[in-house]
Amino acid sequence: MTHDEWNKEDGLELRLCSSANPLGQGFTGLEPVLDIIEATGEEFHPKDMTLKRRLKYSRSKLRDRLPEVTFQGTVMFLLGCARFPSAYFNVSSSLNVPEEGRFSLSLHANPFSIFTGPGKAEERARRIVELARAFAARFPVSYGFAHSGTDFVMGGAPRLKNTSAPLGVHQTHWLNLFGPRMVEQLGRQRVLSTPAFLVEELPHGAVLLLTRPTPSDFFSEEARFAQARALVHLRPELKLEDTLTALRQRSLAFTPIEPDFDPDIADLLTLTLQRSGLDTRRADIERLNRYRPLLPSEWLPAREVPPSDVLDVAEAIRIYEHQYAEQLAVLLHTKVPSVMDASPESLPELDYFLWWQGWGSRLPEAERELFTTSLGAYLGALMVRNLGGRWVPRRNLDEAAVITGARAWLPFLRARHALQSRQAALDFSLTQFYRHAARRVISH
């Protein structure tokens, strides 16, 4: 897997904040903001706009529609970029946030490979720097940055959790924009002497700092050293080696690692990775590479199976397969459509659904019992239909067995175990149980 494929969920996050509130003047105050955005270049020029609905971009339409997204001192709308379908500007203002963030202009540029492609990385990086300069020339800057969105979140900036947290330099990014208040707090001479690729004074007392020429290698050793060196300079109480260690640890998240999952449940574990963000995916794969569920224990030798104790064996089997098993399709046909096919290929998706929903620990007892019965019957019916199994019904469903070869499998008991908790959906997956039984059939 290439770095770009691995990191396709990441994007460049640019955020510029000001204590001014141009949107408080309506469209007249917005026009200088649009001038800045449109000057960013043809690739980033607005193509469409999302207010209450998505429309083709034009200033005249935006002027007419702006009242739709203005409410009690808050304004917010999106402008999609012409060249990149997943890139957009977010323009917002609010009187309900700290003064230094009253107005913000953000660019969310996905995927990050926009800024790593050959021949365009330097030009697109230059456009972002020019946008930051233009913003600082027009509005009094509070703060700003441009960096990998994922890496920014991993850095744990206090304002991610609390928008009222005081301003401060908690990490350094590819592009850093310090407003005059921050510069004075840090010491202007200290800021201007920061070891960096570029340190530039801007109008109104702001300072622009670039740690590297482009953002493309933000997680490389060279970029991490540049970020650490700049941060330690601005915050002398920090230690360079400690800062570097933390940054290097974050860099691992952006380095691909190949899955080496237990073969019986590899497709199931791959499905669980859909819920892993880029910031945790590598650690999740490392953990799942080590994970090996115990072999199924819900079986006994066929010769030890107690005989059926139901009055009508044929009727019991009919209920298992045409009432209980089909009941699962009624319950999950929209959430797990593959159960309608009643095939073994549905089992990984079914297990994934159980894991993701965590129903085992959330359902009331009566509903969990109903679901256990449906799951067990569905699993047993697949074993009868595809593995040549034979039902041995019992009044206690946990004892009901499907005999294949020399073993008797207990599908209702397996379903009960799988519904004990969210983790149990993996530890006692229906997928592993079925495939383990299938191998025993083939080997005999």
Image (spheres, rainbow, N blue to C red):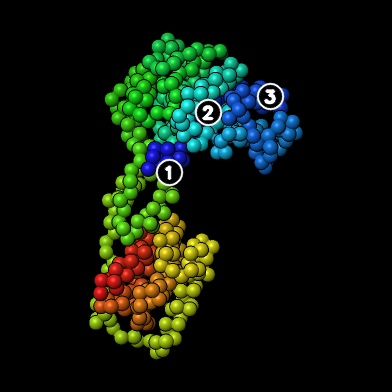
Residue 358 seen anywhere in this rendered image of the structure = no
Quadrant holding the C terminus: bottom left
| Residues tagged 1 and 2 counted as in contact (Cβ below 8 A) | no
- Residue 47 x/y as whole percent: 64, 34
The image quadrant that residue 433 belongs to is bottom left
* Residue shown at 35% from the left, 81% from the top: 390
The image quadrant that residue 211 belongs to is top left
- Residue 128 x/y as whole percent: 53, 24
Q: State the SS at label 3.
A: helix
Tell me: 73 left or right of 268: right
Which residue is label 2 attached to? 15
Distance, label 1 to label 2, CA atoms, is 21 Å
Query: Vertical placement of 280 versus 134: above or below?
Result: below
| Mark with earlier residue (1, 2) | 2
Q: State the SS at label 2.
A: strand
Which residue is label 1 attached to? 277
Nearest the viewer among 108 and 331 is 108
Which residue is label 3 attached to? 31
Nearest the viewer among 122 and 86 is 122
Residue 402 seen anywhere in this rendered image of the structure = yes
Nearest the viewer among 277 and 219 is 219
Query: Vertical placement of 278 versus 194: above or below?
Result: below
Amino acid marked by disc 2: Arg
Amino acid marked by disc 1: Gly
Q: Residue furthest front?
A: 119
Query: Vertical placement of 300 versus 69: above or below?
Result: below
| Mark with earlier residue (3, 1) | 3
